[in-house]
Amino acid sequence: MKKYGFGVDIGGTTCKIGLFEAAGQVVDKWEIPTDKREAGKNILPDIAASLQQKMAEKSIPSEAIEGIGIGIPGPVDGNGMVSMCVNLGWKNMDVPQEMQSLMGGIPVKAGNDANVAALGEMWQGGGKGCQDLVMVTLGTGVGGGIIIHGQIVAGANGAGGEIGHITVNPHESIACNCGRKGCLEQYASATGIARLAKERLAQEHRKSLLDQMEEISAKSVFDAYKQQDQTAGEIVEKFARILGNALSNIACVADPEVFVIGGGVSKAGMPLLEAVEKYYKRAAFSSCADTKFALASLGNDAGIYGGVKMVLE
């Protein structure tokens, strides 16, 4: 009987790592720097060395490790192959094969970090108890993960769950970071909400709490909204309408039990959830109208939980 598994979440600055018992309890968690020099060639060897050091520290033999699950910040196909990951400098990297070789044959699985985080939230977070969910991460950008029948939907090219780049405004003149125009990310991310606010304030003649803010951010918009500021309310309503409508379209394809909302913007809490859900229900197909909404609860640990879940099945 295997007793342990590792979950790894590779980020652009650090790699988060967790050692778990097979039943799902965290034994230990830690971070190491992500060495992106020389096209990221040291990243997997550094992770392997850290895992081996932890195994020696805990006196855990290789035979007791069920596997290693890794989340990667870029498209990953169903076999764990990364054709290109700009954030790490990787091209055509067979992550499971490379890591398995470094770890003496211990089984390895890999997936896109947002999809893996969604799996973690399904297992032990905001989506616990559900087998079909869509996770939406509202941060600097908009990420997503789709889980159907408990399995990650990676897609043919590893782009399954890239909901931030759904086109929601074909008339947009400003380009998204992806190079296209009118993506959901341009309106529902932290930077997108700040942009909506600045555009609204440039046209606004009423007094607003936002006028007193040193910096216009998603947080300042929601802080003013919670104080019933009228201008902030209009900005939040626009954001919520765009995101709610987009999620209603996603529901027609994925039909999840729950939408789990995470990322820095989600710290606005229930007021955000209620605003988005209101517009979702107005636009949703009747069979999907009662889909639940929940806040993500694992925070930065969602990736390591999802990583180990991939190998503890």
Image (cartoon, rainbow, N blue to C red):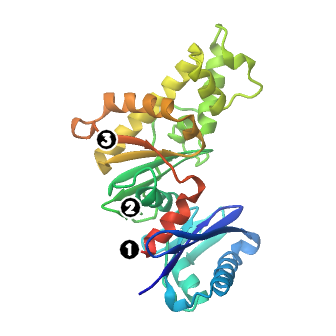
Residue 142 visible in this rendered orientation of the protein: yes
- Ranked by sequence position, the earlier of labels 3 and 1 is 3
Identify the mark nearer the N-term, 3 or 2. 2
Mark 3 sits on what residue?
291
Q: Quadrant of the C terminus?
A: bottom left
What whole-number distance in Å separates the C-alpha atoms at marks 3 and 1? 26 Å
Residue 59 place in picture, x, y as percent: 62, 88
Quadrant where the image shows the N terminus: bottom left
Classed neighbour count for the residue bearing mark 3: other residues with Cα under 10 Å, few (<14), some (14–19), many (≥20): some
Are there few (<14), some (14-19), or many (20+) residues within 10 Å of tag 1?
few
Q: Where residue 207 appears, x then y in whole percent?
A: 67, 9
Q: Nearer the viewer, mark 3 or mark 2?
A: 3
Q: Secondary structure at mark 3?
A: loop
- Judged left or right of residue 144, residue 285 is left
Q: Which residue is mark 1?
A: 313
162 vs 218, nearest the viewer: 218
* Image disc number at residue 69: none
Point 53% across, 37% down: residue: 188
Q: Is residue 111 above or below residue 57?
A: above
Residue at the image point whose x is 55% and y is 77% from the top = 95
Most extreme residue toward the left is 287
In this rendering, position of residue 291 left or right of residue 274? left
Give, as a three-letter code, the residue at label 2.
Val
Q: Which of the 4 image quarters holds residue 199?
A: top right
Which disc, if any, is residue 153? 2
Three-letter residue code for mark 1: Glu
Numbered disc 2: secondary structure: loop
Q: x, y percentage for residue 88?
A: 66, 66
